[in-house]
Image: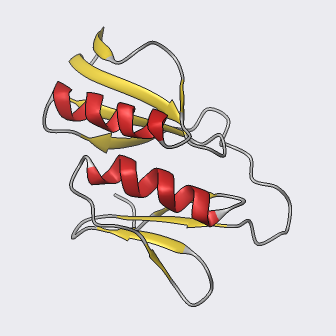
Amino acid sequence: MFSHIMIGGDDLSVSKKFYDAVLATVDVPEGVMDPKGRLFYRTPTSVLAISVPIDGAPTTGANGGTIGFACDSPEQADAWHAAGIANGGMNVEDLPGWREGASGKVYLAYLLDPFGNKICALHR
């Protein structure tokens, strides 16, 4: 449905430490910096990119936006959440757990990354 997702980060070494730890829990390889200084995480079906904002203004989290990462189990979502907290993330919303909604029962864990981007681990 999309070619990539790009978010901002004011210090990509901080972003790399955080996302290397969080994404390792869902089997995504370590991020790679490109010649322009942007950080990329690639899988066969997806790309997550992180860049210092090109307009020179500070990074701000997308108000109302969330990026979801698929997990194979509640335990994997918990490991994802713990890795994020240990690497500069902050819990947001409820603690990780099962939720009932219009799309059925799902296990969710939410974090803010070090620059305020809202991310989520989801097991269905």
Left or right of 105? Residue 21 is right
Q: Is residue 4 above or below residue 59?
A: below
Residue 93 appears at what percent x and percent y? 51, 17
For the question of whether residue 124 can be seen, the reply is no
**Screen quadrant of the N terminus:** bottom left
Q: Is residue 97 above or below residue 56?
A: above
Nearer to us in this view, 12 or 54? 12
Residue 112 appears at what percent x and percent y? 56, 35
Q: How many marks?
A: 0
Nearer to us in this view, 13 or 54? 13
Q: Quadrant of residue 56?
A: bottom right
For the question of whether residue 32 can be seen, the reply is yes
Q: As drawn, which residue projects farthest toward the front?
A: 86
**Screen quadrant of the C terminus:** top left
Q: Residue at x 74, y 65 (%)?
A: 53
Q: Is residue 124 above or below residue 57?
A: above
Q: Residue at x 68, y 61 (%)?
A: 11
Q: Is residue 38 above or below residue 101?
A: below
Q: As drawn, which residue projects farthest toward the bottom?
A: 35
Q: Residue at x 28, y 66 (%)?
A: 29
